């Protein structure tokens, strides 16, 4: 199918199973690149920050800056996907990612690294948002669960491979941590070539204005909120004049953004979408899942390396139970949803498992039995595999093809927002808790707290004397347990939200939604053995 200019309503396409797989090959490779950009540094980050002489705040912001950029640009990518060539946009996102990666590898300080991570985040935001949008354009909702499993598998492989690749790179003396940023470049270039050859979609062109004011105000409000969360309790007190100024400023910017969005002809985040109960509740759940997923899991590498003294490579291997749980759950449940057309039960079960998993991880300490820890991580992985992609799927099932970009990007936006807030907030909690636990431990040894010698930087436990090393390991272990415990209520919020979502069986076509009664009758007919034609499937 060649590219052509078509009316806005004709954004759905019909493709065979083979054509879909060919087109998805480059798309999934691009998604792998986006995931790799965040996971490849997870186990390498303690070494990176140590060599660049950064502290816990820098550790947090190297992650948060990319998440913030992803969050702020996701609605823009989604809106552009509804207005212009999706293929051109995904290739542009890959180009931006390559540029950011190369510059990040050349960074000489934490400030430069954080700035380059912002550029990486812009590209990664486009890749993650557009992967969902393009897949939704090609595949009917009923069949999308099957292919969503492929997305989940790629996410799992990227999450498994990233930390392992990063760990091996850091542990290999003739490579060094800078190759953690270069390693994704060849994958991105291959993805560009494959997409050029295999991805052919109709191009939507219509007169419209990009809501730059709305995008700017949303970014400013989120940025100010994240800066406050990451600095409060460290640079200034939670109850202080700086806190009041930042919180009030963020609220005012947010209110102004809402006002602009309600009046804009083409808003970045269309307010009308929130009149839909499913979208609103899915957004609430996505925020909560994002807080737990990014905010808690990003510190696992730090826990394994500081509390348990493991190498970056071993840190990656020790997270395998969580990743395998995500891989199996997303793949298996995706196929089950395609077969039945029903999805709510899996969202409920997944959110419940997340809540249980985070609560169990709240018992984490430096000497926690690894067998128990593996079970806890497995529970979290299965929970994530059952919720992440299916929240997007539930939203896409409620909108027409001309709004797929905006609706999909709204879920991705708020999930990334939750993740960015989670990383900042839980990072601040971890820094505060570690400081207190370290001081308590040193006091019990009769040593002044200043003798730890860290000066706010991440410690290299292998260079510390025995008694001091035990104190630091215990402090980081206890602090890691505290942040997982703090993430558990957010998973509970996600569970409550998905319980109240009204389940509508997945549509068997890729056009505009029809009434619930027609969909219900279609599902009942399929269950009774009546023939059902599924768009895009090759027998």
Image: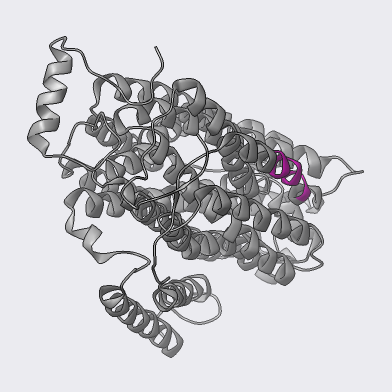
Residue at 40 percent of width and 42 percent of height: 358
Q: Nearer the viewer, residue 202 or 307?
A: 202
Residue 538 vs 267, above or below: the answer is: above
Residue at 53 percent of width and 55 percent of height: 125
Q: Is residue 190 left or right of residue 385?
A: right
Image spot of residue 281 (x, y percent):
23, 51
Residue at 23 percent of width and 28 percent of height: 342
Q: Residue furthest top?
A: 529
Quarter holding the C terminus is top left
Q: Is residue 470 left or right of residue 385?
A: right
Residue at 14 percent of width and 24 percent of height: 522
Let me know if residue 57 appears in the view.
Answer: yes
Rendered image quadrant of residue 246: bottom left
Let me know if residue 367 appears in the view.
Answer: no
Judge whether residue 186 is colored magenta.
yes
Give the total of numbered labels. Answer: 0
Residue 419 vs 329, above or below: the answer is: below
**What span is in magenta?**
182-190
Rendered image quadrant of residue 156: top right
Q: Nearer the viewer, residue 245 or 159?
A: 159
Image spot of residue 533 (x, y percent):
26, 19
Q: Nearer the viewer, residue 19 or 1?
A: 1
Image spot of residue 149 (x, y percent):
44, 28
Classified by dominant secondary structure, the portion drawn in magenta counts as: helix
Q: Nearer the viewer, residue 245 or 535?
A: 535
Judge whether residue 479 is colored magenta.
no
Residue 320 vs 185, above or below: the answer is: above
Q: Is residue 316 left or right of residue 417?
A: right
């Amino acid at each position: 199918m060649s590219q052509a200019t078509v009316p806005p309503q004709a954004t759905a396409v019909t493709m065979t199973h083979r054509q879909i797989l060919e087109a998805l090959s480059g798309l999934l490779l691009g998604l792998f690149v986006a995931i790799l950009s965040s996971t490849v540094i997870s186990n390498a980050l303690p070494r990176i920050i140590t060599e660049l002489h950064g502290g816990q705040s820098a550790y947090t912001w190297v992650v948060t800056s990319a998440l913030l950029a992803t969050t702020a640009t996701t609605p823009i990518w989604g809106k552009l996907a509804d207005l212009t060539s999706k293929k051109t946009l995904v290739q542009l996102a890959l180009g931006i990612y390559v540029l950011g990666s190369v510059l990040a590898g050349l960074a000489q300080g934490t400030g430069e690294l954080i700035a380059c991570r912002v550029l990486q985040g812009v590209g990664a935001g486009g890749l993650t948002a557009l992967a969902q949008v393009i897949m939704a354009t090609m595949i009917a909702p009923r069949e999308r669960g099957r292919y969503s499993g492929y997305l989940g598998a790629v996410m799992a492989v990227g999450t498994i491979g990233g930390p392992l690749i990063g760990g091996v790179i850091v542990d290999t003396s003739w490579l060094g941590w800078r190759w953690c940023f270069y390693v994704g470049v060849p994958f991105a270039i291959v993805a560009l070539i494959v997409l050029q050859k295999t991805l052919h979609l109709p191009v939507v062109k219509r007169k419209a204005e990009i809501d730059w004011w709305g995008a700017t105000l949303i970014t400013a409000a989120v940025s100010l909120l994240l800066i406050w969360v990451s600095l409060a309790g460290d640079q200034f007190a939670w109850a202080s004049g700086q806190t009041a100024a930042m919180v009030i400023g963020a609220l005012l910017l947010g209110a102004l953004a809402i006002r602009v969005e309600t009046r804009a002809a083409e808003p970045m985040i269309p307010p009308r979408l929130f009149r839909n109960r499913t979208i609103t509740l899915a957004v609430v759940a996505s925020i909560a899942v994002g807080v737990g997923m990014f905010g808690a899991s990003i510190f696992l590498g730090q826990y394994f390396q500081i509390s348990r003294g493991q190498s970056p490579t071993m840190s990656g291997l020790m997270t395998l139970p969580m990743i395998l749980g995500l891989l199996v759950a997303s793949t298996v449940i995706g196929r089950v949803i395609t077969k039945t057309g029903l999805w709510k039960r899996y969202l409920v079960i997944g959110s419940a498992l997340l809540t249980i998993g985070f609560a169990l991880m709240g018992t984490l300490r430096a000497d926690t039995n690894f067998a128990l820890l593996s079970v806890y991580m497995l529970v979290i992985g299965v929970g994530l595999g059952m919720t992440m992609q299916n929240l997007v799927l539930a939203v896409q099932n409620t909108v027409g093809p001309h709004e797929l970009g905006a609706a999909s990007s709204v879920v991705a936006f708020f999930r990334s927002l939750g993740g960015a807030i989670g990383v900042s907030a839980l990072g601040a909690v971890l820094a505060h808790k570690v400081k207190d636990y370290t001081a308590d431990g040193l006091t019990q040894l009769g040593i002044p707290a200043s003798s730890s010698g860290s000066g706010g930087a991440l410690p290299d436990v292998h260079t510390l004397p025995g008694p001091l090393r035990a104190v630091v390991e215990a402090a980081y272990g206890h602090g890691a347990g505290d942040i997982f415990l703090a993430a558990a209520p957010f998973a509970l919020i996600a569970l409550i939200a998905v319980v109240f979502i009204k389940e509508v069986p997945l549509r068997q076509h890729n056009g505009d939604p029809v009434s619930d009664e027609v969909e219900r009758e279609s599902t009942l007919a399929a269950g009774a053995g009546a023939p059902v034609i599924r768009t895009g499937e090759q027998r």
